[in-house]
Amino acid sequence: MKILIIRFSSIGDIVLTTPVVRCLKQQKKTTIHYLIKKNYTEVLQNNVYIDKLLAFDKKEQKETIKKLQKENYDLIIDLQNNLSSFFIKRKLYKKTLTVNKKNIKKWLLVNTGKDLLKREHIVERYFQTIKKINVKNDQKGLDFFINPKVEQSTTISKSKILETPFIAWAIGATYSKKKISIPQIIEVLNRYDKPVVLLGGKKEQKEAEQIILYSKNNKIINFCGKLTLQESAFLVNKSELILTNDTGLMHIASAFKKQIISFWGCTKPSLGMAPYKASEHSVQLVSYPNSPPCSKLGNRCRKHKQACILEINPEEIYKALIKEN
């Protein structure tokens, strides 16, 4: 059997599909191709269960479809379920299984507080998608494979961070309302004197510089915008634990079974995107835990002009950090 899996983005969402990829490969002995956006190929480029990784660019959609038509797939598994994936499926004329995103139930949870999702994780929804072909969840969690060459990274080796135990703090997120603030982080690190690496993209570089400038901890290293995703994942794997917003590195940390202290404000674990099968010692710090999520994506806050995640007390973060470290 030859299968095409479609999931275009983003980092965390793609990582959350990896149990499906593994179980398909191991239980069906199938050939697996995976269609993904070009700028996210690094997430899966070393995945041992994928036979071919196909880069998708909307500008080259016609060319991509022509290539896919030549592959003659037996089955398409659509874990994206949007207009682009619909168009591709329509052009391939093959048997298709499509994930139910349960958007109506998400809308009800966000807008009325009525929880029909019952904390069902997105990974379980993915497995419901392939139930018809008798593939079952092996309960082994997520996968993330690191290229062995990453260990030779000069940026990491020059920092000498691997010479001593350290924690990682992923300070980025897709939306600002999913991020705890610089003052919150500084307040925690003012009381924490062990090595810390700050992880994030280029847009977090200045934030990281401010954290270092105003924190009393002189063992902080700013890696924001300086590493590839593979290099960031390597440091997450080497860390003692990670503090993180609801973002891609959180799910990569889950793949490594790391201890995770995750922060939740405008998004909530009830939406089904909590760390999946991470260390049992992981902690979820949630502002307004008895309230529904402010928005599905975390781009809006119903309680504050800024974000309700700012209500998480730094003292609570510090206590969780000391307890788990």
Image (cartoon, helix red, strand yellow):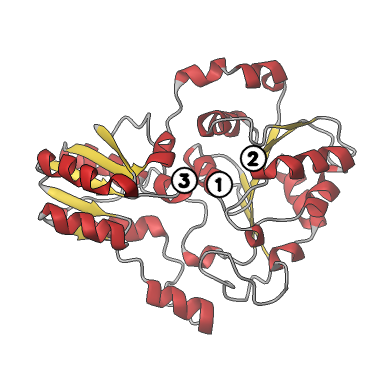
Neighbours of disc 1 within 10 Å: few (<14), some (14-19), many (20+): many
Q: Is residue 107 above or below residue 194?
A: below
Neighbours of disc 2 within 10 Å: few (<14), some (14-19), many (20+): some
Q: Quadrant of residue 196?
A: top right
Where residue 11 is drawn, which disc sits there? 3
Kindly report which numbered mark, 1 or 3, lies closer to the viewer in this rendering.
3
* Visible residue check, residue 238: yes
Q: Is residue 12 left or right of residue 155?
A: left
Asked whether 162 or 208 is in front, the reply is 208
The residue at 62%/76% (across/down) is 291
Residue 277, given in percent of the width and then of the height, sits at 47, 48
Tell me the quarter of the image containing the C terminus: top right
Residue 139, given in percent of the width and then of the height, sits at 36, 47
Tell me the SS state at disc 2. Answer: helix
Tell me the quarter of the image containing the N terminus: top left
Asked whether 61 or 286 is in front, the reply is 61
Measure the alpha-carbon separation of dots 2 and 3. Answer: 16 Å
Q: Is residue 93 left or right of residue 297?
A: left
Where residue 250 is drawn, which disc sits there? 1
Q: Is residue 108 above or below residue 157?
A: below
Q: Is residue 216 above or below residue 17?
A: above
Residue 244, given in percent of the width and then of the height, sits at 64, 48
The residue under label 2 is 202
Tell me the SS state at disc 3. Answer: helix
The residue at 82%/43% (across/down) is 210
Q: Amino acid at mark 1?
A: Met
- All told, the count of numbered labels is 3
Q: Quadrant of residue 52?
A: top left
Q: Are marks 2 and 3 in contact (CB under 8 Å)?
A: no
Q: Amino acid at mark 3?
A: Ile
Mark found first going from the N terminus, 1 or 3: 3
Residue 135, given in percent of the width and then of the height, sits at 21, 50
